[in-house]
Amino acid sequence: MTKLLCNIYKSRRKEETYLYVSLADDLSRVPEVLLDTFGSLELVTKMIITPERKFARADAQNVLASIKEKGFYLQLPPPKEEMGLGLDLFCKRDKDE
């Protein structure tokens, strides 16, 4: 699979959680339990994904493979440790002043 036109949805119930699906299949291959967990979905964008495409939190080849195999790719929020990365540096400096 060299490229795929996708819909990207975000969950209104779960922050920073996104669901990538092929435009052709849309949500038809996504398990009902996952859709229930997501709650109502908001279409964020349509995008052509190629293996070379750069994502901040995902590898494009993994996204494409997951959509091909399972019908979707689920992007979860970063671990809480990553979200707070570097904040302790600001707090430490502020305490020293």
Image: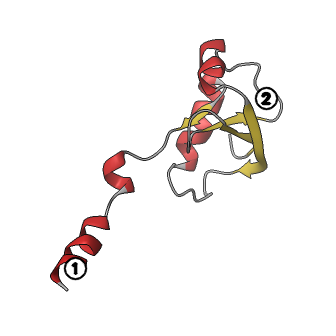
**Residue topped by disc 2:** 26
Q: Nearer the viewer, residue 49 or 34?
A: 34
Q: Which of 79 and 5 is in front in this view?
A: 79
Residue at (50%, 52%) from the top-left corner? 57
Decide: few, some or many residues near mark 2? Use Cα within 10 Å; few <14, some 14-19, many ≥20: some
- Name the residue at the top extreme: 32
Question: Vertically, is 26 above or below 51?
Answer: above
**Residue topped by disc 1:** 93
Residue type, mark 2 in image: Asp
> Is 32 positioned to the left or the right of 4 in the image?
left
- Name the residue at the right extreme: 24
Does label 1 or label 2 sit earlier along the sequence? 2
Q: Nearer the viewer, residue 52 or 9?
A: 9
> x and y percent of residue 25 in the render?
79, 26
| Quadrant housing the C terminus | bottom left
Disc 1 from disc 2: Cα separation? 48 Å
Residue at (20%, 73%) from the top-left corner? 92
Confirm whether residue 9 shows in the render: yes
> Is 94 positioned to the left or the right of 60 in the image?
left
Residue at (25%, 71%) from the top-left corner? 91
Residue type, mark 1 in image: Arg
